[in-house]
Image (cartoon, grey):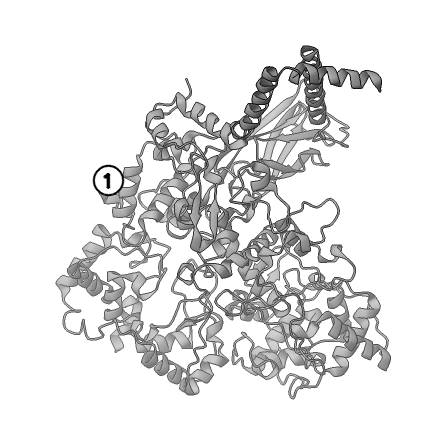
Amino acid sequence: MMRRSTASMTIGISAAITLLSFATLAGCKHSKPANAGLKATAQGTALVESSGDHQVGVTGTALKDPLVVQVNDDQGTAVPGALVEFHGSAGVSFDPAAAITDSGGQATTSVTLGAIAGRYELSAATPGKVKPVSLEIVETALGYQERVGSILADKYCSRCHDPESSPQRVSNYDNLEVKPHSFTDGSTLNKMSDADLTSIILHGGPALNRSALMPPYGITLMASDVKALIAYTRAVSDPPYQPPGTVYERK
Amino acid sequence: MQPIRKYLSSVWQALFGDPVRAFGVVSLILLLALAIAPAKEHFSQWHSYQRKYLALIHDRGDALSLRRRFVPGIHQIWLPELGVVDRCTTCHLGLNEASLADVSQQPFRKHPVVPHSLDGFGCVICHGGQGQATTIAEAYHSERAGEEPILPTRYIESGCGQCHQNALPGTPQLNLGRTILTRYGCVHCHAITRPDGSKVEATDHPPSLAHIADKTTREWIFSWLKDPQAYAASTTMPNYKLSDGDASDISAYLVSSSKPQAGDSAAPSAKPAAAADPAAGPSLYGESFCASCHAVQNAAGNLVGGDLGPELTRIGNKAKPEWLAAWLENPRVYDSTTPMPNYRFTPQQNATLVAFLQAKSDSDFGTGVHLDAASPQQIAHGRKLIVELGCAACHEINGVQGPENFAPDLSTIGSKPLAQIVFLPGMEHSLPSYIAAKIRQPRAFGSSVKMPQFTLTAAQTDALTTALLALTARSRAIPDNLRVAAVPDTKYQPAGHAGKLIAELACFSCHRFNGRGGDMAPDLTWEGSAVQRQWLMDFLHNPNTLRPSLIRRMPRFNLSDSDNKELTDYLLTVYQSPAIDADLFSAITNSADAVEHGRQLFYSKYACQACHIVDTKADKGYIGPTLTQVGSRLTPGWVYAWLKNPQALRPGTTEPNQNLSDDDARALTAFLMSQKGPGGRGAKQ
């Protein structure tokens, strides 16, 4: 008697669990697809980036400029009316997440990066005439420390280290006999250790037998400022910076 | 009924029929009941995260040290004086583990580097949420009364703003939000009291409308009220979404209540030079550096110029020429507290500038606006609307008192209970989303909402939301020693005739003296110790640029010789730094050896040419001031003290402190003081 009732209870519970998990799965399947309500009227064969790649933003906030991609056909002409979907890792959001290209063949979205600092590899995809085409886009989100570094770099460093010149902010880069390295110049800066970068910031170029045009900032900046500057250069480095030492990976 | 009863009685019999068996069954039930609590704990969310954490660190090279620091069970950061009871670290186990920097799996990530320690401040002070909760649902997503979901990362700087009432270098978004709060005049209607009791003061300068009819027409007021941004895209005046009738009635009241100001209606006495020389207007506008404060939209639609004064793209549509002439003649007659300087233009210059500005008009603006003369009822209705909409909270209006506490006090808006908020359908139920939505579209919350439509970008809305979220009840409860006070401007006022001149020239709009003034131009608190008399006289007479890379520059004021002398004397006498030794270099400055040694140091050891120009042919440095005439401009005592420690004289200046020895600083000073510039202007002295 007892055994039978236990058995029937077990069956009942497992049935309930199965039902529940089906319901959950079905619920997931029913979540709204990104391209709901969008109808593509044309298809291209290539996807190219127009603007908005390689931006440096702040964790959890929208990037300053929108991401614009263009769908082309095999002649390289822009294709209006094609569907473009944007994808990113967890935490990244796009507004809109899918779009139909405008008369210039371009699709525009506003990107908000996730709460974790670092490089974000995003992608744009279009179904394509022959096969699906996708495009990789890299954006960088700065955390608190890296952003403090970017603000300090803007005040103390970028007038010489950033060759980009504008009427509002004329670069001093071209005026210098020994050219400073851009902070994104990973091929050079990645080879320098944190200790080297620290000493060149603290004591100036001559500390590492480099140009005296780089002055010492050891008294002007606090130790935490120097760390922030280094964290910033590491964050925007291209190619990306790999920290030295043992990398602990799961076996 | 019968079979069920029979079935139950047989079960009863089977379980408890025999006393020994009954004892066994009761013991089993007791055991199960006792197991409920441990089982509940075993299957709890935090316990499963602790097991996952142990699995995560198990295979790592540093597993041993990580495991040694791992303590099973509920963790808690308890800070009674801050009211913090945070159990977040029960699951967020890697926050303090530097070696977990490569782990991206939550909740085990290392906390990013921030200035405060987790053990000293806990988590919820910055992140919000419920610190005592030990499940995700309760800690992050609770909407119950008195509870608040966790703060989205985009507003995280509001956490800093609870203690830091001053502008922090690392919180640009919070700083921008606070600037908007004062610059867009939010605090004219909404009172905000800081935790230390001081009031947040507005920094905008809403014009007085007491003499508005002298300045412009009723038709312009009508078009402006209907859509301020159509006239000037950059204006901070919000759109009240008025009907044609209401805008017409308000304009009627403003014009009818306006009292004429002497001088505003006098026709200009001189003819503009534009007829003879079409370039005279633009060049006068350019050399007066009007663009340092006023913006104008260029052909591409971009605003070019500063934002201290109103945008002038369509000024010709607005200002009457007689008023403009009187305003340029002396702005303080119309508005005694305006940030606009008195340029002392000649009548000819004044007329030229009026003609140039009048030509800045847009034929599309305000077309088709024809207002019939208003009846007394319409004027009375206009006054009623002005009272209802609170126009006098910002503007001085004849016959209408400025309202007190016109809109809700926002001093603790960051702790507004969710239960008191009426959310719109489909809106996320959280305080940040409510505040952001209210800023974005106030009238969406009901037609009776008086708050007007502001024109803010998405980034500005986020910043303003951040600044408002910082106004929490907690920010008032924290101990005083943790609070960093705001640094409001002092009430410093220079005295005498020179003080009157400084007010007329509106020096405070750009320069700072003794903790009061703008930040567009250098702080002049120690200017008297820094510069030489003849240079200052020449500079005030005709300012030449010191920093080639700047676009905003000191305008030329047509000072009389006596005013110039008065101002120079005052600046040199009053603004003296006690740290500068004026007599330091009287004897050794001219030593040729010292000059040569200084030159060596300048070009090789310290490589000053990276940023400064001494020899215009060889040097290219484009960041610091040009030093070709520094020997006739600055005093040796100042140069020496500056070289020793620039930040001591001007906090925040970018020139690094190079830790010069006294000898090196003396030699460099000697070299710099030998730079008298072409023509040797300094040699005359």
| Residue A58 position in % (x across, y down) | 51, 43
Residue A119 seen in this snapshot = yes
Q: Residue B205's quadrant in the figure?
A: bottom right
| Snapshot quadrant of residue B479 | bottom left
Residue at left 57%, top 20%? B28
Looking at the rendering, which quadrant does residue B230 occupy?
A: bottom right
Q: What x and y, as percent, mark residue B291?
A: 54, 65
| Residue B138, image x, y percentages | 58, 40
**Considering only vertical position in the picture, is B128 above or below A121?**
below
| In the foreground, A210 or A5 | A5
Q: Quadrant of the N terminus of chain A?
A: top right
Give the labeled residue for mark 1: A208
Rendered residue at 45%/38% (across/down): B89
Q: Is residue B169 visible?
A: no
Along the horizontal axis of the image, is B434 left or right of A185? Answer: right
Q: Is residue A7 toward the left or the right of residue A122 in the image?
A: right
Q: Nearer the viewer, residue B127 or B622?
A: B127
**Callout 1: 10 Å neighbours few (<14), some, many (20+)?**
few
Residue A153: x and y in percent read: 40, 48
Q: Is residue B134 above or below residue B477?
A: above
Q: For the residue marked with disc 1, what is the amino acid?
A: Leu
| Pointer 1 chain | A
Local SS, label 1: helix
